[in-house]
Structures are given as C-alpha cells and as structure tokens.
Image (cartoon, rainbow, N blue to C red):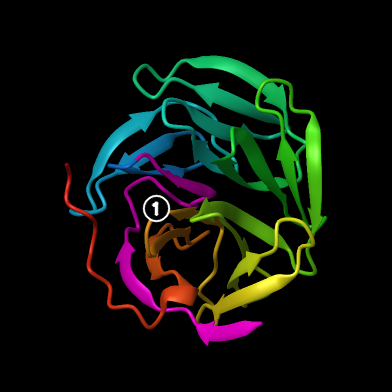
Amino acid sequence: MNRSPAEILREYGPFPGVDHVHGVTFDGRQVWLAAGETLQAFDPASGEITRSLDVAAHAGTAFDGRYLFQISEAHIQKIDPQTGRVVATIPAPGGGGDSGLAWAEGTLWVGQHRARKIYQIDPETGAILRTIESNRFVTGVTWVDGELWHGTWEGDRSELRHVDPESGEVLDEGAMPPGVNVSGLESDGGDRFFCGGGASGKVRAVRRPTHASRPYRGPEPEK
C-alpha cells in the first residue's frame, strides 16, 4: 500500500447557515453540499453559494448526470436539481447508519459509517448488489478513473483511501492533517477531491493522493 500525506489545495467556507457538511457531490460545474435541512451548491472557482434546495440532506450526496441523490435518514431521495422536487425514494441499505454516496456503473455506492462497509445498490429498488468490508469507519465514497475511494474518520484522524472494489484491500492512502476530518467525498473527474469537513462547515479541495507527484493544473476549461 502507498501512504502519503494528503495535500489540501483550497478551503471553501464556512458557509452562512451551514453548521455541518454531511455530504458532497459535483455536477461538472457546481459542488453540492448536504447541510441538514438544505442541499446547497457553490461555484468552486469563486467559492460563492449559487443554489439552495429545501430538501432533507443528512448524509451522502451523488449526481448521475441528471438527478441528485441524497441520503435522508433511512432513505435515499432522487431529486430534480432544476426544481428541487423529489421524484423517487428508495430505502438506504444501512437503515439510518449510512454515510457516503456515489454514482458509478449505473448504480449507487453507499458507505455505512460504523458498520465499516460500502454497498453497491440498485438505484431503482435499493437492492444490495455487492458488499465491501473496511477496517475503518466509512464516510464519503467516490469513483474516478475506475478507482473506488472512500473517506475515513475516527477520533481526530481521517484518511482518503483507494480500495479494491472486489476485495476491499487498501491500495493507496492519503492522511489528512490531525483534526481535519472528512465527512463527504467526491472527485471532480480529475486530480481533485472535494471533501466535506463535518462540523467545521467547510469543504476542502484535496489532491488525489496517487497523483501527488503530478503538478495541479486547476480545473479543466469549459468546452
């Protein structure tokens, strides 16, 4: 396993009215953060809040290219980001103990915090398709370049972990500074992760650990 310190590129927030960041996702333009009773979006270039939806947002958040998915207690809501309307709801596999959420391969991937698991589930029914075991508490979950990553948070320690999606073996690990926690995780599709900062009310941009030797070039220009 490759271990290295995680490199924080930028901090966003704390944001007005956001006491805790529970989950994060990226829609290609905006970063969305789950703030308890609202789902808010900000511009990663300016750091300014651009949208706010009045939906329950208690844990992980994901985006499938059209819809947002948001964990709300023991359920996962499918949300139209244009209107804020909840168009479908499925049961969450942890029954309320769920944490991170990601979209990949046409399915949802759900972290279970204290159970130390990641589930792959059917986005239409919530049926569990695969279970991956971890040896640490699981927070945020994301996929990038065919790699499955998840955040951890125990005590004042957090890491970003690249794991084998079949065996759960840890392949790469980036350690966050002591006291800097990860409550949500999302990739920008390149070398940046967006990490929810829990009760700090912040979101941090962090370099993907396996790409630590590659110069960060900033976001890709819009086409």
> Is 140 on the left or on the right of 127, as rendered?
left
- The image position of residue 154, as x and y in percent, is 69, 71
Which part of the image, by quadrant, shows the C terminus? top left
Residue 83, picture quadrant = top left
- The image position of residue 106, as x and y in percent, is 59, 32
- The image position of residue 31, as x and y in percent, is 35, 46
The crowding category of the residue bearing disc 1, from other C-alpha atoms within 10 Å (few below 14, some 14 to 19, many at least 20), is some
Q: Residue at x 56, y 33 (%)?
A: 70
Amino acid type, label 1? Gly
> Is 2 on the left or on the right of 32, as rendered?
right
- The image position of residue 77, as x and y in percent, is 59, 25
Q: Residue at x 59, y 55 (%)?
A: 140
Q: Secondary structure at mark 1?
A: loop
Residue 42, picture quadrant = top left
Q: Residue at x 72, y 41 (%)?
A: 120
Residue 223, compared with residue 127, is above or below; it is: below
Residue 98, compared with residue 175, is above or below; it is: above
Q: Is residue 120 visible?
A: yes
Q: 10 or 96: which is nearer to us?
A: 10
Q: 86 or 18: which is nearer to us?
A: 86
What span is colored magenta in the figure? 1-27
Q: 223 or 80: which is nearer to us?
A: 223
Which part of the image, by quadrant, shows the N terminus? bottom right
Residue 113, compared with residue 108, is above or below; it is: below
Number of numbered discs present? 1
Residue behind mark 1: 189
Quick check: is 18 in the magenta stretch? yes
Residue 72, picture quadrant = top right
Q: Residue at x 38, y 38 (%)?
A: 40
Q: 60 or 169: which is nearer to us?
A: 169
Quick check: is 159 in the magenta stretch? no
Q: Is residue 94 visible?
A: no
